[in-house]
Image (cartoon, helix red, strand yellow):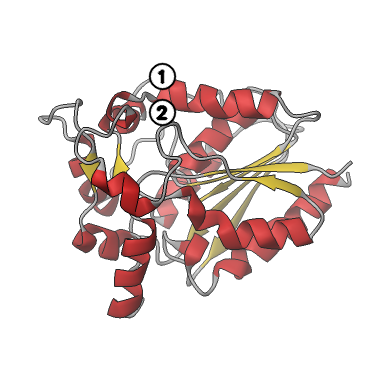
């Protein structure tokens, strides 16, 4: 029976950002799924038309989102591999911490509670989404300028515009605010299945030093926790030309740890 992989999407973008990854890992012999968040199972253009109320998305919580993916993992015939990007990377860390995965990968993950993000680029990018003085009854739509700076930096303008049109979607402020609460907590001292955390040298949203602090918080003798850094990767790595650089390294890492 083939090993299952669950791909977990982050904030601001459609689950279709995983399309190339699904093809690659399927061809490598895995059973792959990339379930959307609740209220996000629609094309990006359709979801943007729901803005600002969000038809349920606005009031989604991080606890509900984590439990959504936990239920998917628990329903599979074996413990799956969980691979998450950005906020999805945080969710992958939480599922690994709960013992619901055989292995986990956080691709440029949002840090768990307790890893304080003091980096200006992170605070600048997330301040509008948190919207501490805005209504939680309305979703937040990332602007093209913000998307360009955080997901598509370094790409030609026409490519940035195309990526925004294909993938950018409204987001829940309540999910984002959950990242400041115990819903985002991880027990760094708890034994866990193999975990890989990756970082991108050109990531303006989750900078390398923030991801390194996340990685270094793990202190569990006997548990595998690894780190890989990709100097040319930015935060939108899932859809960019160098996506396969990270995908191949993750595939090789999985082969190593799952064979032990």
Do we see residue 71 in this rendering?
Answer: yes
Most foreground residue, 151 or 58: 58
What is the secondary structure assignment of the residue under circle 2? loop
User: What x and y, as percent, mark residue 42?
Assistant: 42, 45
Instruction: Count all numbered tags in the image, as a single digit.
Output: 2
Residue furthest left in the image: 133
Q: Is residue 114 left or right of residue 99?
A: left
For residue 115, above or below residue 147: above
Q: Mark 1 Cα within 10 Å, few/some/many (few <14, many 20+)?
A: few
Quarter assignment of residue 55: top left
Residue at the image point whose x is 55% and y is 61% from the top: 229
Q: Which residue is mark 2?
A: 113
Q: Is residue 3 left or right of residue 82?
A: right
What is the secondary structure assignment of the residue under circle 1? helix
User: What x and y, as percent, mark residue 46?
Assistant: 33, 48
Residue at the image point whose x is 41% and y is 19% from the top: 182
Per the rendering, the mark at residue 182 is 1
In three-dimensional space, the C-alpha distance between marks 2 and 1, rounded to whole angstroms, equals: 7 Å
Earlier-in-chain disc, 2 versus 1:
2
Q: Is residue 83 left or right of residue 149?
A: right
Quarter assignment of residue 193: top right
Screen quadrant of the N terminus: top right
Say if mark 2 contacts mark 1, CB within 8 Å: yes
User: What x and y, as percent, mark residue 233?
Assistant: 47, 67
């Amino acid at each position: 029976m083939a090993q299952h992989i669950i791909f977990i999407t982050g904030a601001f973008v459609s689950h279709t950002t995983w399309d190339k990854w699904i093809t690659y890992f399927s061809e490598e012999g895995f059973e792959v799924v990339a379930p959307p968040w609740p209220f996000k199972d629609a094309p990006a253009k359709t979801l943007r038309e729901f803005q600002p109320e969000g038809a349920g998305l606005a009031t989604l919580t991080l606890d509900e989102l984590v439990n959504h993916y936990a239920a998917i993992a628990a329903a599979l015939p074996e413990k799956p591999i969980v691979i998450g990007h950005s906020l999805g990377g945080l969710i992958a860390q939480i599922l690994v911490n709960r013992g619901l995965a055989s292995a986990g990968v956080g691709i440029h993950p949002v840090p768990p509670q307790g890893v304080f993000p003091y980096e200006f680029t992170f605070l600048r990018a997330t301040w509008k989404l948190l919207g501490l003085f805005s209504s939680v009854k309305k979703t937040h739509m990332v602007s093209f300028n913000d998307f360009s700076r955080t997901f598509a930096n370094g790409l030609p303008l026409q490519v940035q515009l195309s990526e925004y049109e294909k993938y950018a979607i409204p987001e829940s402020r309540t999910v984002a605010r959950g990242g400041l609460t115990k819903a985002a907590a991880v027990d760094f001292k708890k034994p866990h299945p193999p975990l890989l955390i990756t970082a991108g040298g050109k990531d303006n949203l989750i900078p390398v030093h923030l991801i390194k602090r996340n990685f270094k918080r793990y202190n569990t003798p006997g548990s595998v926790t690894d780190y890989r850094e990709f100097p040319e990767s930015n935060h939108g790595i899932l859809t960019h030309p160098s996506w396969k650089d990270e995908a191949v390294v993750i595939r090789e890492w999985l082969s190593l740890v799952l064979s032990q």
